[in-house]
Every structure is written in C-alpha cells, then in structure tokens.
Image (tube, rainbow, N blue to C red):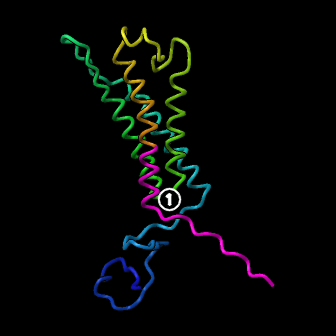
Amino acid sequence: MSRLRFGPGAAASSSEEAAPGPLRVHQGSDAAVPAPMGGLPAGLGAVGFGLLAGLAAVLWQSWSTVLTSGAVIVLPWGALLGSLVVFGAAMAWGLRTSLRWVAGLTGLVAFCVVGAASVGGNDQLMVPLDPIYFTATPGAAWSTVVIMLGTVVATLVALTLVARRVPPPAAPKARAQR
C-alpha cells in the first residue's frame, strides 16, 4: 500500500514520507480521514457548536412568509434555515473529530436549546403547540413545528452521513496472557 503524501512536491517525491498530521486511510477508500480527536475536547466542542446552532435556529425560526390569497399558505423558511444550520454544525464537527457520537451530541444540545426556548410564560420565543395558535398565528405555529421536527431530522441525517464517512472504532486488543 502506498502512503499518502501532502505538501509541495509530494507528487514528484519518490521517498516514502509519513503524511503530516494524524491521518489514516480506512479500508475500502482512498480518502484520508483525520485521526479521532480526544473524547473531552470533542464533547466540549459538540456542546459549544450545539448551543450556537440551537441559538441560531431559535432566532431564525420566527422568519416565515404567510400567503393569504384564498387559503392560508405558510412558508417557514427561517425554520428550515435553522434546521440546516443544525445539520451543518453536526456534520462538520462530526467529520472534523472523526467520532460518530459527536454529531448526535451536537444535534441533541441544539434540540435542547430549541426546546428550552419554547418553555416559559408570556415571554417565550415560540408558540405552544395548541390548535388555537394554528388559526390565530399560523406562521409562528408552523415554524415551531418545522424547527422542532427539522432539528431531529437534521441530527439523524448528520448521524447517518457521519457514520458512513467515519470508520468504526478499532476493537481493543486483548492483552497477551502470560
């Protein structure tokens, strides 16, 4: 198996040099994958990115367009954009760390932020899922539904794609018996 070479002159070089940084090639693919990051930094990064993605999703979910010519048509494009941000954060950090669980943790934290924004009294950022709000404020009600479900779908899709791209962790080697 030939080694991957990076940097200037890598294609012209005939010496077998190790690739810079901790890269590995997983079986069945010619693509280099970064070596997994440690669990604590990856987890802290996942929490941080999840908080930021969840905050962006909550702030953008209120942007919607309501068309009222004849029937009421709601286009909750802000909620879709917020779900896309959650997907991007989970996917990017999951691939960067090369750990499968990181994408799930990022999405879970983002979902918790979105859920926490819907809890409260009269000062909440999202409307309760009550039938009266679907007739009184259809844009806000549908945006709430789309952002809650969109965060879950975005997380599951990111988990699936990261799991396909990142090889499974190596099994721990058994200790040699004396």
Secondary element at tag 1? helix
Q: Position of residue 32 (x, y in %)?
A: 40, 70
Location of residue 106 with respect to 59 vertically, above or below: below
Location of residue 31 with respect to 97 vertically, above or below: below
Is residue 147 left or right of 72 when viewed as pictured?
right
Q: Few, some or many C-alpha atoms within 10 Å of disc 1 (few <14, some 14-19, many ≥20)?
A: many
Q: Which residue is mark 1?
A: 97
Quarter holding residue 72: top left
Which portion, as a residue range, is magenta? 156-178
Q: Residue, x 32% and y 82% (percent of image)? A: 10
Q: Residue, x 31% and y 79% (percent of image)? A: 8
Q: Position of residue 11 (x, y in %)?
A: 29, 83
Quarter holding residue 165: bottom left
Q: Position of residue 78 (x, y in %)?
A: 33, 29
Residue 116 magenta-drawn? no
Pick the front one: 52 or 171: 171
Residue 161 magenta-drawn? yes
Question: Could you tell me the amino acid type at mark 1?
Answer: Thr
- Image quadrant containing the N terminus: bottom left
Q: Residue, x 45% and y 47% (percent of image)? A: 90
Q: Residue, x 41% and y 83% (percent of image)? A: 3
Location of residue 139 with respect to 7 vertically, above or below: above
Looking at the image, the residue that sits furthest to the bottom is 14
